[in-house]
Image (cartoon, helix red, strand yellow):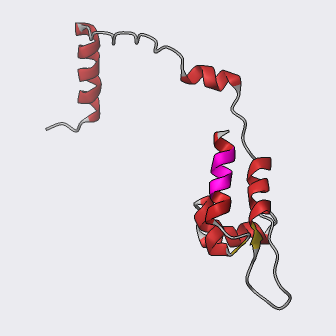
Amino acid sequence: MAQKDTLDAIRQQYPPILTTAQVAELLGLNVRTVMVMANDGRLPASRLPGSRKYHFILEDVLATLADHRIPQPVAATKAMVKEPTAKAAPAKATAASTKAASAKRAKRSPGK
């Protein structure tokens, strides 16, 4: 229901034939990106003969968005609401490991 309301709001806000700038605004893209996507066929567009401007039909753009909707897998949904797991406590440094680390640093650093 919410998706239908959203689409109705978009239909009221935009005219039936869109310019490249309007499609860029609608999709949240750069104008140049919209032009490239129209040129390579990812977005349905048309041009009048002899024109360099693209024209987009609003319903075609909305249909393309619906056709390429990414479904969210059930496992991913469950993972998002999964209870947080307890983190393991960090290991405490022992005297031996501290000595070993100091010896390594001493080897790497030039003598004074």
Residue 3, image x, y percentages: 67, 43
- In this rendering, the answer to whether 71 lies above or below 34 is above
Dominant secondary structure of the residues highlighted in magenta in the image:
helix
Quadrant where the N terminus lies?
top right
Residue 51 pos. (x, y %)? 78, 89
Q: From where the camera sits, is residue 44 visible?
A: yes
Highlighted magenta segment, given as a residue range: 4-9
| Residue occupying the point 41% across, 10% down | 86
Tell whether 103 sits left or right of 58: left
Q: At 69% across and 46% down in the image, what residue appears? A: 4
In the displayed structure image, the side of residue 79 where residue 3 appears, left or right: right
Image: 26 above or below 17 = above
Q: How many marks?
A: 0
Q: Residue 26, how many percent across, how many down?
A: 61, 62
Q: Is residue 75 magenta?
A: no
* Residue 38, image quadrant: bottom right
Q: Residue furthest left?
A: 112
Q: Which residue is found at the position 28% from the left and 21% from the top?
A: 101
The residue sitting at 62% across, 55% down in the picture is 9
